[in-house]
Image (cartoon, rainbow, N blue to C red):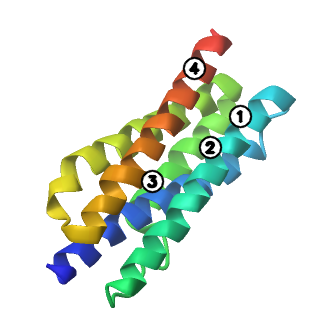
């Protein structure tokens, strides 16, 4: 079980690292202070999740993933194109990433056990829902 938990948590970790990288890239291209502040809040939420997941993997005796993997490269490519198109496109790309992250947590929750499942159910998934909702509200204010 610990092996499965480590694999699943590492998948979540790669997604969170990708989110951190993508938010940092987007923030660099946002000039509106209100939007930048909202994105920075989301970034900090994802950074917190990265640390929580790393700690749990280490407690399980695993080695945390060191990067975002292929999804991270794709997300950066999408965000890079969105940055060129402006803030609305960047927010849209970030929201799609939030959709993906939420779907990952919901789909793979049952692959975890014990403390790993508690972490996902009680901390990671609710935090991802809050970040997703924050970005959805931000997107709606831009239309």
Q: Measure how far apart labels 4 and 3 are at the Cα level.
A: 25 Å
Q: Measure how far apart labels 4 and 1 are at the Cα level.
A: 10 Å
**Residue 136 spot, x, y in % from top left:** 52, 24
Residue lying farthest to the bottom in this orientation: 61
Say left or right for 86 vs 54. right
Q: Which residue is rendered at x = 77% and y = 40% of the image? A: 29
Q: Is residue 21 visible?
A: yes
- Residue holding disc 3: 74
Q: Earlier in the sequence, mark 3 or mark 1?
A: 1
Q: Measure how far apart labels 4 and 2 are at the Cα level.
A: 12 Å
Tell me the element at label 2. Answer: helix
Q: Which residue is rendered at x = 56% and y = 54% of the image? A: 46
Q: Earlier in the sequence, mark 4 or mark 1?
A: 1
Q: In terms of image quadrants, where is residue 10?
A: bottom left
Compare residues 27 and 10 and report the one nearer the observer: 10
**Residue 85 spot, x, y in % from top left:** 66, 28
Compare residues 80 and 43 and report the one nearer the observer: 43
Disc number at residue 42?
Answer: 2
- Residue holding disc 4: 137
- Label 3 with label 2: CB-CB less than 8 Å: no
Quadrant holding the C terminus: top right
Front of the two marks 3 and 2: 2
Front of the two marks 3 and 1: 1
- Residue holding disc 1: 38
Q: Earlier in the sequence, mark 3 or mark 2?
A: 2
- Label 4 with label 3: CB-CB less than 8 Å: no
Q: Measure how far apart labels 1 and 2 are at the Cα level.
A: 6 Å
């Amino acid at each position: 079980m610990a092996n499965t938990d480590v694999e699943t948590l590492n998948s979540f970790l790669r997604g969170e690292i990708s989110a951190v990288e993508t938010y940092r890239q987007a923030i660099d291209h946002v000039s509106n202070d209100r939007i930048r502040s909202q994105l920075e809040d989301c970034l900090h939420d994802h950074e917190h999740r990265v640390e929580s997941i790393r700690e749990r993997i280490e407690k399980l005796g695993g080695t945390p993933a060191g990067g975002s993997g292929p999804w991270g490269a794709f997300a950066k490519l999408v965000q890079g194109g969105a940055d060129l198109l402006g803030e609305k496109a960047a927010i849209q790309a970030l929201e799609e990433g939030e959709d993906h992250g939420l779907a990952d947590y919901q789909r793979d929750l049952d692959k975890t056990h014990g403390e790993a499942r508690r972490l996902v159910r009680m901390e990671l998934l609710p935090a991802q829902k809050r970040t997703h909702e924050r970005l959805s509200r931000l997107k709606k204010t831009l239309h």
